[in-house]
Image (cartoon, rainbow, N blue to C red):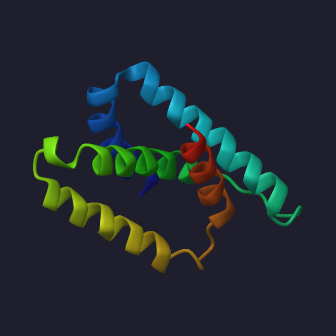
């Protein structure tokens, strides 16, 4: 699911913001998610995955969506897809996921 989400989001974001900017946000999201997970998770837990990067890209998409709503093609469809993603993420957050890495990338996204 992470790979599919990254594919869909990154194609759009890379076309809009360029490879370097998209990479920087993805890299900072990965570092932020990993650091928050390392600090706040149980020390015996091993957390691996791309959730921090996915939520960083979702954060960038959401900010861009809110700031440029009138310029976006098919804004209602994209809003519904974003809402579906967030509802799915919230509904599955109590499963074996590192919610802390999601939180960590969100904090970095706000700072950027």
Residue 48 appearing in the image:
yes
* Quadrant in the picture for residue 43: bottom right
Across and down, in percent, residue 102 comes to: 59, 58
**Quarter holding residue 45:** bottom right
Q: Which quadrant: the N terminus?
A: bottom left
Please count the marks in the image. 0
62 displayed left or right of 68: right
Q: Residue at x 60, y 41 (%)?
A: 111
Residue 93 to residue 15: above or below: below
- In the image, residue 33 lies at what x, y percent? 66, 49
Residue 6: percent from left, percent from top: 40, 45
Q: Residue furthest left?
A: 74
Residue at the image point whose x is 61% and y is 41% from the top: 30
Assign the C terminus to one quadrant of the image.
top right
Q: Residue at x 34, y 27 (%)?
A: 17
Q: Position of residue 60 (x, y in %)?
A: 42, 44
Question: Which residue lies at the image location 71% right of the left edge and 47% below the top edge?
Answer: 34
Can residue 98 be seen in this snapshot? no
Residue lying at the far right in this picture: please name it: 43
User: Is 96 rendered above or below residue 62?
Assistant: below
């Amino acid at each position: 699911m992470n790979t599919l989400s990254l594919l869909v989001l990154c194609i759009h974001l890379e076309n809009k913001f360029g490879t370097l900017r998209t990479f920087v946000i993805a890299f900072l999201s990965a570092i932020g998610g990993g650091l928050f997970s390392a600090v706040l998770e149980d020390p015996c837990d091993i957390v691996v995955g791309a959730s921090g990067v996915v939520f960083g890209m979702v954060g960038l998409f959401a900010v861009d969506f809110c700031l440029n709503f009138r310029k976006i093609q098919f804004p209602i469809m994209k809003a519904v897809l974003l809402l579906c993603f967030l509802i799915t993420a919230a509904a599955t957050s109590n499963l074996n996921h590192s919610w802390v890495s999601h939180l960590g990338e969100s904090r970095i996204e706000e700072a950027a």
